[in-house]
Amino acid sequence: MIEIKFSDIIKSSFPDLKVIQVETEVENSYTSSELWDELLLASEQLRNQFSLADLNKRYSIEATRKAYKKLGKDPNRYRPSAEALGRRIINGKGIYRLSTLIDIINLVSIRTGYSIGGFDISKIRGNILTLDAGTHEDIFNGIGRGPLNIEGLPVYRDSLGGIGTPTSDEERTKISEETTKLLMLVNVYGEEISLEETEDMIKKYLIKYAGLNSYFSKIITSSNF
């Protein structure tokens, strides 16, 4: 199992931070019609619930934005992924149909407002990830975004460098069609949907759509250290 640690700056800045860690063996594939229909339904419900002006006041998203500000990052320039996805939906731009694992992550993010990291475990170097604050020295290539300035963003690092922030994950450890061992990290800076309900949602979708073979989950807080 991957061990998750919080750096001193994360522990002192966010004493109430909770992270849901999920590790699982799964099958990735092209997104089924049934999963796609669930994504479209969740998108429609989001549009009915929030206006563009109100989205950043959604409790889970607002809490993540406050975390950015606390570390010195402007959340209007580097939006949390849950907010960016929600804005795209509300603006009527639609969502991309990608792969089963990525679309499950997107579905859970839409329903909860949490920014979720998804990683291919086989590409992670070492068995420890440390959640820390990004610096100007970090080299980080966001998925589909190229070089990303992650100074002031919360970032998970393995032995080679950063692999995930609430804004974007890194190309090096991204999910692909060949991914069979999945790590999901749900970053909860403010609890809108209960952790237990979120865990149950993830497991349900992985069983239903991703041929779940094994499953491990854990809730990590500052009190774990």
Image (cartoon, rainbow, N blue to C red):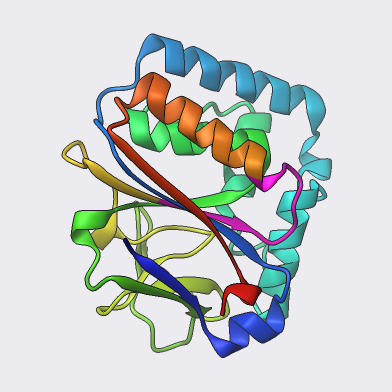
Asked whether the viewer can see residue 98, the reply is no
Going by the image, does 125 lie left or right of 163? left
Position in image of residue 115 (x %, y %): 57, 51
Q: Residue 25: where, in percent of width, then height? A: 27, 40
Q: Report the residue at 40% width, 30% height from top.
A: 206
Location of the N terminus (image quadrant): bottom left
Q: How many marks?
A: 0
Quadrant occupied by the C terminus: bottom right
Residue 162 image point, x, y percent: 36, 73
Instruction: Please provide the residue range marked out in magenta.
Output: 184-195
Q: Position of residue 117 (x, y in %)?
A: 45, 53
Q: Nearer the viewer, residue 198 or 84?
A: 198
Can residue 194 be found in the magenta stretch? yes
Q: Is residue 154 visible?
A: yes
Compared to residue 10, the image places residue 48 above or below, namely: above
- Residue shown at 64%/42% (left/top)? 196
Q: Quadrant of residue 178?
A: top left
Q: Is residue 184 left or right of residue 210?
A: right
Q: Residue furthest left?
A: 178
Please state if 145 lies on the left or on the right of 93 as rendered. Answer: left
